[in-house]
Image: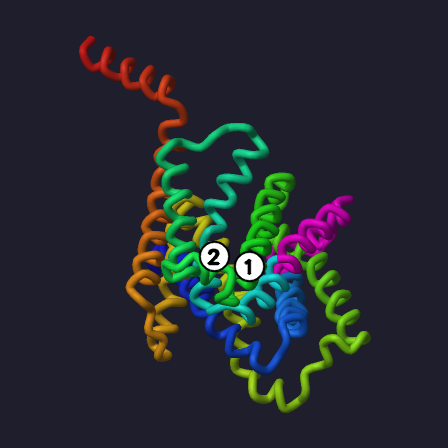
């Protein structure tokens, strides 16, 4: 099996999730959809963790509260805000906003460490946000206010920031495997998701989905649970293990490409400005990733110059 296949499977699966989730939301509200998705996925994660690492790995090692908080910010925050956002915007726009997460991670890391990214990365970030703005506004700034989709895109961006915080939180658990961190934090997340959903259900704000709605959406539910929530996460972790985080993250740029391709196949006709904005964003995402990889190989210009001079002196000795 090719080394890149797990990363490719994960990103193709996530790209298709946006239009499929948008279709599912015609039958099931965002809160019950999220509760069903992770109510079924979390036991699978816990079962896999017990099978792979033993029952002892199910213990939070005295860090249950921290895992609960991070899981709530990541799984509950990103998914609830994301699905509510998708209801209010186009799924391809949502995928493009979500694809900004690697760049948001760069900005968050800069804020936490006070270490600025390289100039090329900063330029790529600016270009990516400009491309997203073109897609959302179609070149007309007034559409951001009156077009109706900006609120949904804003919710997705807020959810993406929550996922960035969750991802950075993994650094606090170096002794945990990716599977263990995912399973235990997702357990905290599903508790928050169920609590919010139950509160909305009891209050009457979001009634339980009817049997008729579940029957109409059962195939989409299978996809968002079995493929987008379980298979994609496991494939992504395997891809990172095989290729490394930098190489694997390149594949994440396919997520909006897949979402746009499905939208076009369903009859959507993007305008020239929207296509240009999408291409600009994807190109900037790739450029930022490549710039980040270059920075890893060449951490600072003085150190790189010293290394190059030492190699040159040695070759001439």
Q: Position of residue 217 (x, y in %)?
A: 56, 83
Question: Are the residues flagged by discs 1 and 2 in contact, CB closer than 8 Å?
Answer: yes
Q: Callout 2: helix, strand or loop?
A: helix
**Distance of label 1 from label 2 (alpha carbons):** 7 Å
At 57% from the left and 77% from the top, the residue drawn is: 25
The answer, for residue 221, to whether it is visible in the render is no
Say above or below: 79 vs 219. above
At 81% from the left and 74% from the top, the residue drawn is: 203
Q: Earlier in the sequence, mark 1 or mark 2?
A: 2
**As drawn, is 70 to the left or to the right of 24?**
right
Q: Callout 1: helix, strand or loop?
A: helix
Mark 1 Cα shell of 10 Å, populated few (<14), some (14-19), many (≥20): many
Q: Give the extent of the magenta segment.
A: 48-77
Say above or below: 146 vs 123. below
Residue position marked by numbered label 2 in the rendering: 97
Residue at the farthest top position: 317
Q: Position of residue 85 (x, y in %)?
A: 57, 65
Which label was assigned to residue 156? 1
Which label was assigned to residue 281? none
**As drawn, is 211 to the left or to the right of 228?**
right
């Amino acid at each position: 099996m090719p080394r890149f296949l797990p990363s490719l499977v994960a990103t193709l699966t996530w790209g298709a999730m946006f239009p499929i989730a948008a279709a599912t939301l015609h039958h099931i509200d965002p809160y019950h959809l999220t509760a069903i998705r992770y109510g079924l996925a979390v036991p699978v994660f816990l079962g896999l963790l017990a099978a792979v690492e033993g029952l002892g790995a199910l213990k939070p090692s005295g860090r249950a509260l921290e895992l609960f908080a991070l899981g709530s910010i990541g799984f509950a925050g990103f998914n609830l805000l994301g699905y509510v956002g998708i209801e209010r915007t186009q799924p391809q726009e949502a995928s493009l906003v979500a694809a900004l997460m690697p760049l948001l991670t760069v900005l968050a890391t800069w804020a936490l460490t006070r270490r600025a990214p390289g100039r090329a990365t900063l330029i790529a970030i600016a270009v990516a946000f400009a491309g997203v703005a073109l897609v959302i506004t179609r070149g007309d700034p007034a559409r951001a206010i009156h077009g109706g989709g900006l609120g949904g895109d804003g919710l997705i961006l807020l959810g993406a920031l929550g996922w960035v915080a969750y991802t950075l939180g993994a650094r606090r658990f170096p002794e945990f495997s990716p599977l263990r961190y995912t399973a235990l934090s997702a357990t905290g997340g599903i508790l928050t998701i169920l609590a919010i959903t139950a509160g909305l259900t009891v209050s009457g704000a979001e009634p339980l989905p009817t049997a008729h709605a579940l029957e109409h959406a059962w195939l989409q539910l299978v996809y968002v649970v079995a493929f987008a929530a379980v298979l994609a996460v496991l494939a992504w972790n395997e891809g990172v293990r095989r290729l490394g985080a930098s190489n694997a993250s390149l594949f994440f740029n396919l997520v909006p490409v897949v979402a746009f391709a499905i939208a076009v196949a369903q009859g959507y006709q993007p305008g020239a400005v929207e296509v240009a904005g999408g291409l600009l964003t994807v190109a900037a995402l790739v450029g930022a990733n490549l710039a980040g990889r270059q920075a890893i190989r060449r951490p600072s210009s003085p150190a790189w110059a010293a290394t190059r001079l030492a190699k040159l002196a040695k070759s001439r000795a």
